[in-house]
Amino acid sequence: MNDQPNLESPRRARPDELDAILTLANKVMRIGQDRQPTIATDYPFIYNHKNAKNITVVMQDQGTNGNLAISMVGAWMNTVAVGDVRFLAGGINCLATLPGYRGQGLATQVMGRLWST
């Protein structure tokens, strides 16, 4: 999959990984741009335990230090009703990869896995 050791294949996030996921999202999308780390409060409908299944991640095993989120994308799904017709619609949020891991196709992989079964 890549040159980095201990990287998992892209998969759905687990609720217990939200802190690591938010750390990555804030580092890339906020702190790296000299902004406050507000992803959790800006997008609470995405970054919560119930929606973890709609977040795709690549994690790296850090041994006794736990797992580090390397690449991720968040999404949300909504049922839209137009008259009697109902369909799912959603959006993508915070496609991010740690700077030292870029150029390996990880963002492409998490996007490809996002809504696959």
Image (cartoon, rainbow, N blue to C red):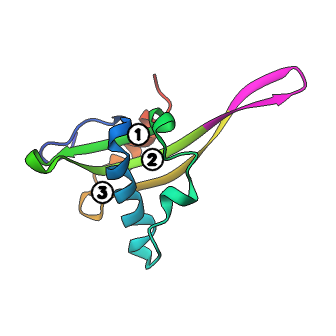
Decide: few, some or many residues near mark 1? Use Cα within 10 Å; few <14, some 14-19, many ≥20.
many
Whether residue 68 is visible, yes or no, is yes
Identify the disc placed on residue 56. Answer: 1
Q: Is residue 107 above or below residue 30?
A: above
Residue 73 numbered mark, or none: 2
How far apart are the two marked residues, 3 and 2, measured between alpha carbons?
16 Å
x and y, in percent, of residue 90 in the image: 64, 39
* Three-letter residue code for mark 3: Gly
Can the viewer see residue 54?
A: no
Which numbered mark, 3 or 2, is in the foreground of this view?
2
* Residue contact at pointers 1 and 2, CB within 8 angstroms: yes
Considering the numbered disc 2 on the image, is that residue within a helix, a strand or a loop? strand
- Seen from the viewer's position, the closer of residues 44 and 57 is 44
Residue assigned mark 3: 103
Q: Quadrant of residue 9?
A: top left
**View extreme (left): residue:** 64
Taking the view exactly as shown, the residue that stands out farthest to the right is 83
Please report the bounds of the magenta region as a residue range: 77-88
Task: Report the Cα–Cα distance between label 3 and label 1.
Answer: 18 Å
SS at badge 1: strand
The N terminus: image quadrant: top left
Residue farthest along the bottom direction in this orientation: 34
Going from N to C along the chain, the mark reached first, 1 or 2, is: 1
Q: Identify which residue is drawn at 56% across, 54% down.
A: 43
